[in-house]
Image (tube, helix red, strand yellow):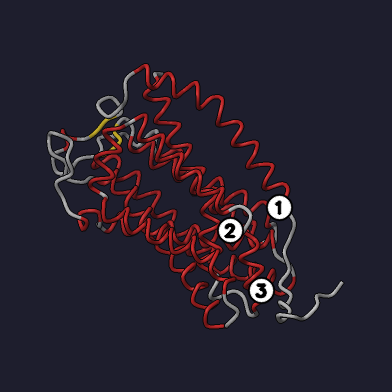
Amino acid sequence: MGLQVTWFVIVAFFWSGYFVLEGFDFGVGMLLPFLPRTEGERGAMFESIGPVWDGNETWLVVAGGATFAAFPTWYATMFSGYYIALLLVLFFLIVRVVSFEWRDKGATHRWRRAWLWANAVGSFGAPLIWGVGLSALLYGVPLNSKNDFTGTFWDLFHPYTVLAGIAVVLFFCFHGATFLTLRTTGALLERAGRTARLVSIPAALVAAGFMIWTVSVAVDRNDKNVYPPVLPAIIAIALLLAAVAFIWLGRSGLAFTATALGIASAVATLFTSLYPRVMVSSPNFGNSLTISNASSAHYTLLVMTVVAAIATPVILLYQGWTYHVFRGRVGGGEVPAEGTPAAG
């Protein structure tokens, strides 16, 4: 396997890590206006992801950096063509990040409620745009012979890409609700379980439909055979169904594991459907970007491989240790009023 293929797989791995880890963050954020009943429960939901959300977003930086270094033409074409879409993602992420810090700067209900909704809107908007944008890489966007994007923002939207955005939102919502069943206690835990069961079936149905349609798009628009894209698609669907079964049986740990692996399999389906192209051109298929005409020089990829081989295990160990330290459940007790001494 050449270095170009190796880095295509590494980029897919980084995107998988981002969606698996940030996915439950987004899911928790989407549920913030609906799941908690008291200020204490709202604080518990923020606390459940508070120690890890910023570390999870690091995977997006790494995925973008790896794409820029390994496939600069892909990076340049995608970021110029997706300019408005990426600005929207950046807006949603900024609003969401600010909400974590500013929510506790005021004590009034209106202030806290506003930033709670800001987090929810950001947590909904970012995955919706990610789903539309990444699926458009496979469905096809207008590129000329110089690999320049010649379309508009609206060329990203098709029934398939819109379904992808909806599937990502539902999948992350299910993933986040399942995560809360592992991190909360009391009445909040019970509502998280009910929400996970409620969301599980539509999430599984929509995501399964997206997987099936992805394989069809790969065959029709990217000159692919049904195999190998169908293999990770089947695995993703099977994991989704397993997650539904586990959450209804009350096996939250297994359900969360299944949703995490299901998200990784869904990303694998998309990238397997893309290979050997990284950006399909439509209607001029011959202008598509491939791993060959979009990659950096061999020496650059070699140096990057050495760096990645050293740094990636360190990052994984550190983040795994972080999750181990903050593995305890959080409660939903009422927050004492200012000036009131807390119970011993």
Q: Residues within 10 Å of mark 1 (few under 14, many from 20)?
A: some
The Cα–Cα distance between marks 1 and 2, rounded to whole angstroms, is: 26 Å
Tell which of 204 and 316 is nearer to you: 316
Q: Extreme top residue here?
A: 299
Could you tell me which secondary element the residue under label 1 belongs to?
loop
Where's the C terminus, which quadrant?
A: bottom right
Where 26 sits versus 320, above or below? below
Tell which of 27 and 49 is nearer to you: 49
Q: Earlier in the sequence, mark 2 or mark 3?
A: 3
Q: Earlier in the sequence, mark 1 or mark 2?
A: 2
Residue occupying image coordinates x 43% and y 25%: 6
Where 152 sits versus 283, above or below? below
Q: Residues within 10 Å of mark 2 (few under 14, many from 20)?
A: many
Q: Earlier in the sequence, mark 3 or mark 1?
A: 3
The three-letter amino acid code for the residue at tag 2 is: Val
The Cα–Cα distance between marks 2 and 3, rounded to whole angstroms, is: 25 Å
Could you tell me which secondary element the residue under label 2 belongs to?
helix
Q: Position of residue 316 (x, y in %)?
A: 61, 37
Q: Pointer 2: what residue? A: 244
Could you tell me which secondary element the residue under label 3 belongs to?
helix
The reply to whether the C-beta atoms of the residues labelled 2 and 3 are less than 8 Å apart is no
The reply to whether the C-beta atoms of the residues labelled 1 and 2 are less than 8 Å apart is no
Q: Pointer 1: what residue? A: 326
The three-letter amino acid code for the residue at tag 1 is: Phe
* Number of the front mark, 2 or 3: 3
Q: Pointer 3: what residue? A: 41
Residue occupying image coordinates x 43% and y 40%: 63
